[in-house]
Amino acid sequence: MLQAKLIKPEKIVIQEVKKPVAEDYEVLIKVKRIGICGSDIHAYFGKHPYISCPIVQGHEFSGEIVEIGKNVKKFSPGDKVTVMPQIVCGKCYPCTHGNYHICNNLKVIGCQADGAAQEYFAVDNKLVIKLPEGMNYDQGAMVEPVAVGVHAAGRLDDIKKKKIIVMGAGPIGNLTAQVEKGLGAEAVMITDINDYRLEIAKKCDIDFTVNTATEDLGEAIQRHFGKNQADAIIECVGIEETISQAVHYSRKGTDIIVVGVFSDKPRVDIGSVQDKELRLIGTLMYKEKDYLAAIDLIQSHKINLKHLISRYFSFQDYGKAYKFIEKKKGNSMKILIDLERGLR
């Protein structure tokens, strides 16, 4: 079978490798779609703090089960599935207290362990989530990033009737903003410096969009949310400027949820964090319940995916997908690798 491997920054090779088989507790998935996310892009350019080459990428994906191990009971060949890409030890403190998603020995498929950038992928069946009838492979590959937004929302005490700011209108920021709306937020403002991405946010019915390169964020918050400002801010960029904005423009007592991956260590005004009694809350990945909630949001049409898929690339053009992303310089959203398009 064919496999795409990132052997060094900016160098993906398509190679022939042995097709895996499903071991006792595994299923073998014929991969159909693979999403390229921000973490993949950081890794491709050698800028991700926790991903090293060589690595087979692919942690957002969907496919069809073609083989099951002898001890697998809840899946059958032909099932349409997606996968939670978390390999955990099950023994550390977080794992034994219900927080396996932050396992002390966590490895992420496609990041610290080889992923699904190949024709067939064998994986432990306990990580597999069956997709409901009517859900397609594009939607299946998007469950993972939607689940990121679901878990971020869950880090707040209560999302309902809250006014939320999401910083960053890329795919994760957009989906997080849509999730907040879908889960009952009163109003959501999304910020960016890229008008293309802000226009996509408008098409996805985000309440307010603000270009912080041309608009004063403080004035925009007052205009849209009034004197009581926002109830929470969700940072989805991962740079010092936006986390600083979150601290500066937050109301006293605000929760700031950190979703963005920081390749460089930011300076944070801890004096303001203390003075305002802010809560800086990290969020990492998701649990199974977040995946199931993400599927429900997609199925109930509370998440608009139509405007988020910018382009498809064939498997052989995996490397070209990154060149396209680099060329567009932020003027694209989600790129999908489609293994049904001219694989052989």
Image: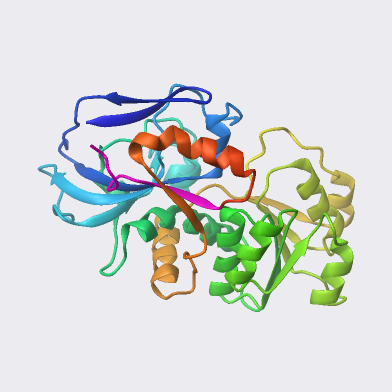
In the rendered view, does 257 fall on the left or right side of 341? right
The x and y percentages for residue 286 are 48, 52
Quarter occupied by the C terminus: top left
Quarter occupied by the N terminus: top left
- From the viewer's perspective, is residue 330 above or below residue 153? above
Depth check: give the residue in front, 328 or 288.
Answer: 328
Residue occupying the far left of the picture: 70
Report if residue 338 lies within the magenta region. yes
- From the viewer's perspective, is residue 184 above or below residue 73? below
At x 89%, y 46%, the residue is: 271
User: Where on the picture, by quarter, is residue 339?
Assistant: top left
- From the viewer's perspective, is residue 320 above or below residue 173? above
Report if residue 32 lies within the magenta region. no
Depth check: give the residue in front, 145 or 292.
Answer: 145
Span highlighted in magenta in the image: 333-344
The x and y percentages for residue 86 are 40, 42
The x and y percentages for residue 328 are 61, 44
At x 26%, y 40%, the residue is: 343
- From the viewer's perspective, is residue 215 above or below residue 28? below
The x and y percentages for residue 149 are 55, 59
At x 15%, y 55%, the residue is: 78
Can residue 110 be seen here? Answer: no
